[in-house]
Image (tube, rainbow, N blue to C red):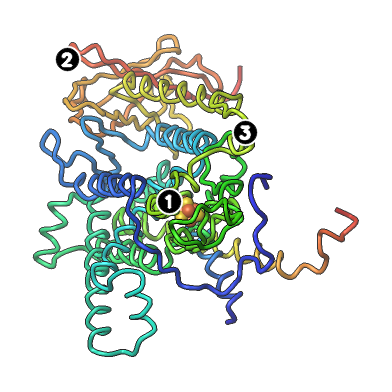
Amino acid sequence: MNAVFKEPPSTGLYAPHRKVYPREVKGRFNRLRVISVIALLGLFYLMPWVQWGGRQAVLFDLPARKFYIFGLTFFPQDFFLLTWLLVIAALSLFFFTALAGRLWCGYACPQTVWTEIFVWMERWTEGNRQQRMKLDRGPWNANKILRKTAKQTLWIAFSLYTGFTFVGYFTPIHELSNGLATLSLGGWEWFWMLFYGFATYGNAGHMREQVCKYMCPYARFQSAMFDRDTLIISYDAARGEPRGSRPRAVDPRSRSLGDCIDCKMCVQACPTGIDIRDGLQLECIACAACIDACDEVMEKMQYPKGLIRYTTQAAMEGRKTRILRPRTAIYGTLLVLLVAGFFWTVAHRTLVEVDVLRDRNALYRRLDNGDIENVYTIRIINKDTKAHEMSLRVEGLPDAVLDTDAPVYLVEAESVASIVARIRAPDTVRGGRDIEVIATATDGSGIESRAQARFIGPAGT
Amino acid sequence: MNKRTQLDTGVVVWASFLGACAATMVFFAFVDPLLIGDDDSPPVWIPDRKTGYALGFFFFWLMCALSSALTAFLLETRSTDPSTDRSL
Ligand code: SF4
Ligand code: SF4
């Protein structure tokens, strides 16, 4: 583990869980998170309703094995693009972690974002931190039942709607809402809706910081990307200590006190329930709530802000922070190359692809005139938004001909045509030979696509 | 179940869920559930692709969970403490 982090206390992973009641904070970082929550969740909930060219803009149509993303259609053959995208995502996470620490955790992780919304709903129904703690301690009277029911109703309704939206990325959402209204949804739609809704409810309503502590792999390995120049949230011990309470008018230096008045606002604000003044800990998701809380106190005390602040280990030690360093330079360069390559590939992707499958039953057949025949199933995958007329031919084997039932095939837009093709060659072919099947558009669009295949003749030389 | 076993079970279920998601994605990117089976028609228990995907997902989840549970069990019950084991 990186030296920057404090060792976890020896009670370890299985310390009994205490419920955390985060105190509400105001401030610039909280504002930033609210903006981020609204933007990200807004995107998630609205996207399925966006139409593009007569259909849902973003739709992962699994039953049809097609992904639509705005004007583009992706087929299983494009799977490498998805892998590529995941590599880019992982690398950007590395890059941003090296640069800015757990920025992802504090502002963009779905866990944080959904928890934030659930905490808002908790506040509307159960009140602020003190009120919530009192309510939980108090007896089950009418007030408590009412407030708890209200909270659960909001949570459950929101979770169900979240599940509905999630499934709306896989089943056209208009169809889905019609199906829901007329109660004619399929079993799997129901199942995945409830599954995702339940996961949201559990993770954002009940598990919260425990997801970060016990379940998240990123939280465990992010420290490997940290170095002394990584942006972290830190308490300025040199300025704050010795901590202690004091009347506002008193100059702390006259009592040999530091700037920390030991009000514990930062601890109360922390959604993971830690004390940042103990040093950087693995539990810290860098949400900056403690910064906002502390700044508010500093302002009241008329001390300079920033007793807890975004800083780096290097800066705390009085050195300059280097943004450009081998680690960030390498991650950054790789990232730029991968992203550029990705867009280039998507832009230059062949719109029509051929796939050749040899007939599984027979190796070859000898015709009456002595010719050798192999049978193939050829699939023409048209990813274009227009239909194309395609013809097939074979290359790589002298005098071989490719024969299909029709001379040309119309392959509809965004669909796959399966064609049985017979390739015939004179009886001079022995053993396996590499051939190429070429599909050419006969409609003047200039599209041509090739695929490798094997032609098999009788054994011998 | 004591608290520790509960948490361990949680970790096994969760880690295998992640594994199953990845496995399902890669597997069905290359295999069309309707083309599973010897001849041209898929087995009766795959009436449509949605069912195929779901069954595949739960199958992978089960397999990953078995593997995770076995790993956890072997790690928990090993007799030597690696920090004192001189053969390591
Ligand atoms: S620790 Fe993990 S789950 Fe928690 S906010 Fe960070 S990335 Fe998200
Ligand atoms: S210590 Fe501060 S930044 Fe870290 S999780 Fe707690 S409130 Fe957020």
* Spot occupied by residue A216 in the image (x, y as percentages of width and height): 51, 55
Amino acid residing under circle 3:
Gly
**Disc 3 on helix, strand or loop?**
loop
Give the labeled residue for mark 3: A318
Disc 3 to disc 2: CB gap under 8 Å: no
Q: Earlier in the sequence, mark 1 or mark 2?
A: 1
* Residue B20 visible at all: no
On the image, the x and y values in percent for residue A322 come to 57, 26
The answer to the question of whether label 3 and label 1 lie on touching residues, with beta carbons closer than 8 A, is no
Task: Answer with left or right where residue B47 lies relative to residue A386.
Answer: right
Pick whichever, A252 or A273, lies toward us.
A252
Q: Nearer the viewer, residue A107 or A28?
A: A28
Quarter holding the C terminus of chain A?
Answer: top right
Q: Residues within 10 Å of mark 2 (few under 14, many from 20)?
A: few
| The residue carrying mark 1 has its beta carbon less than 8 Å from ligand 2 | no
Report, in whole angstroms, how far the alpha carbon at label 1 lies from the one at label 2.
74 Å
- Identify the residue at horizontal 60%, vertical 71% (top origin): A15
Q: Chain of mark 3?
A: A
Note whether A355 is above or below A202 in the view shown. Answer: above
Q: Which residue is mark 1?
A: A298
Vertical arrangement, residue B34 with respect to residue A366, above or below: below
Q: Nearer the viewer, residue A169 or A352?
A: A169
